[in-house]
């Protein structure tokens, strides 16, 4: 089922058919704030009111033209201005294939640099999401380059990748902020752990590395076992609750989000919005095929 969902997520021709399917669209709104920036700002404001921070993500990946990448850059810059004008506690996540990584890495670097520079002027922060393993090396390279000029940019590390321990070491040498997650793509066994147990063990090892570094990092998971391991490690090492943050996805485990805030932990909600929600939604289904239940329940509401 997982492999089928990943396969469907990459089928451009099927995508248009599936997108016309009403129940599927409605189910997506559990994980996506809406198609417009104002929808995302509303969701971020609601998160703030519940004691949580947010990270906005303009959905879109693998743009096919430089014009598309320039448009995405302009939208992200405008998003940063709106966040400032609306005074929401919120940073921004970007994907490099949306900024032209497939087309020309140097052009992509200039787009990312422009966004990070603008965010620096506004006192905001840019998180560079991590895509599939074909992009890992190039993504980290561009983050390192921009980080050499600006402090307000961070990377994402996927615990399922075998290379991640070395990547964490290099990022920590530069004191770059890391979001640690398990990883959301279908990867070959040559580059990624196959069994959940191995990924979880690596997650805990990397979590300990990053928390011990004294830099402010994000622990991005909904897995109660990973959260417990983080809480225990922080408590044992006298790492204050305010020295790191948990991060979760919009629409996932809202109960746990609220509980951690009530216990005094920092929580950031990743809020995606925009018209290009299809691959994002398919990854959420693939992570937990039981989510297909949402689609089916919407079917019966028709
Ligand atoms: P795991 O998959 O083991 O799930 C643990 C529990 O969480 C499940 O039993 C279920 O209760 C709940 N859960 C998890 N996923 C769910 C879903 N889709 N729907 C409903 N419940 C669900 N990945 C990546 O490759 N690059 C990136 O840049 C990011 N960025 C990112 C940001 C943030 C803030 C988060 C939280 C996650 C990411 N991810 C990501 C996704 C991440 O790699 C991973 O795929 C998901 O978080 C699911 O893994 P968990 O750690 O939650 O554990």
Image (spheres, rainbow, N blue to C red):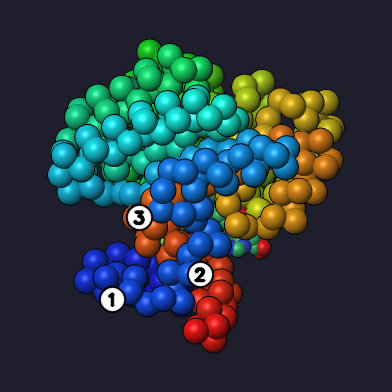
Real-space Cα separation, disc 2 to disc 1, in angstroms? 16 Å
x, y (%) of residue 11? 27, 69
Foreground of the two, 76 or 293: 76
> Residue 78 sits in which quadrant?
top left
Residue drawn at point x = 62 percent, y = 22 percent: 215
Q: Is disc 3 in contact with disc 2, using a CB cutoff of under 8 Å?
A: no
Query: Residue at the location (49% across, 25% down)?
Result: 85
Which residue corresponds to mark 2?
27
Circle 2: element type:
helix
Residue 210 appears in the figure: yes
User: Which residue has dot 1 on it?
Assistant: 17
Residue 35, percent across and down?
A: 41, 53
Does the image show residue 144? no
Circles 2 and 1: CB distance less than 8 Å? no
Q: Is mark 1 within 8 Å of ligand 1?
A: no
The reply to whether the C-beta atoms of the residues labelled 1 and 3 are less than 8 Å apart is no
**Which residue lies at the image location 71% right of the left edge and 49% below the top edge?**
257
Give the camera-side residue of 251 and 102.
Answer: 251
Is residue 7 placed above or below 297 in the rendered structure? above
- Marks 1/3: CA–CA distance: 15 Å
Query: Where residue 202 appears, x then y in whole percent?
Result: 60, 46
Considering only vertical position in the picture, is 218 above or below 181?
above
Nearer the N terminus, badge 2 or badge 1? 1
Question: Which badge, 3 or 2, is on the more N-terminal residue?
Answer: 2
- Camera-side residue: 89 or 204? 89
Q: CA distance from mark 3 to mark 2?
A: 14 Å
Residue 274 x %, y %: 39, 51
Q: Label 3, on which residue?
A: 275
Q: Is residue 44 left or right of residue 132?
A: right
The image quadrant where one finds ligand 1 is bottom right
């Amino acid at each position: 089922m997982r492999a089928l969902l990943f396969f469907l997520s990459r089928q451009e021709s099927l995508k248009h058919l599936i997108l016309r399917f009403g129940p599927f669209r409605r189910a997506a709104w559990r994980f996506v704030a809406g198609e417009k920036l104002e929808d995302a700002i509303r969701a971020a404001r609601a998160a703030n009111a519940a004691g949580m921070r947010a990270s906005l993500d303009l959905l879109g990946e693998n743009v096919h033209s430089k014009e598309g990448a320039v448009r995405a850059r302009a939208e992200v810059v405008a998003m940063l201005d709106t966040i400032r004008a609306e005074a929401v506690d919120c940073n921004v996540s970007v994907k490099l294939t949306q900024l032209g990584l497939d087309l020309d890495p140097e052009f992509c670097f200039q787009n990312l640099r422009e966004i990070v520079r603008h965010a620096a002027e506004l006192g905001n922060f840019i998180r560079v999401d991590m895509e599939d393993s074909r992009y890992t090396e190039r993504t980290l390279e561009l983050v390192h380059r921009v980080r050499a000029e600006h402090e307000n940019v961070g990377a994402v590390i996927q615990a399922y990748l075998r290379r991640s321990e070395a990547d964490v070491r290099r990022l920590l040498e530069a004191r770059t902020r890391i979001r640690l997650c398990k990883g959301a793509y279908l990867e070959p066994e040559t580059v990624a752990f196959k069994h959940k147990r191995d990924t979880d063990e690596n997650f805990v090892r990397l979590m300990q590395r990053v928390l011990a570094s004294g830099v402010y990092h994000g622990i991005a998971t909904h897995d109660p076992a990973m959260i417990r391991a983080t809480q225990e490690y922080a408590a044992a090492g006298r790492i204050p609750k305010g020295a790191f943050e948990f991060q979760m996805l919009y629409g996932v485990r809202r109960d746990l989000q609220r509980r951690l805030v009530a216990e005094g932990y920092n929580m950031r909600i990743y809020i995606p919005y925009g018209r290009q929600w299809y691959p994002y939604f398919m990854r959420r289904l693939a992570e937990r095929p039981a989510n297909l239940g949402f689609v089916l329940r919407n079917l019966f509401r028709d």
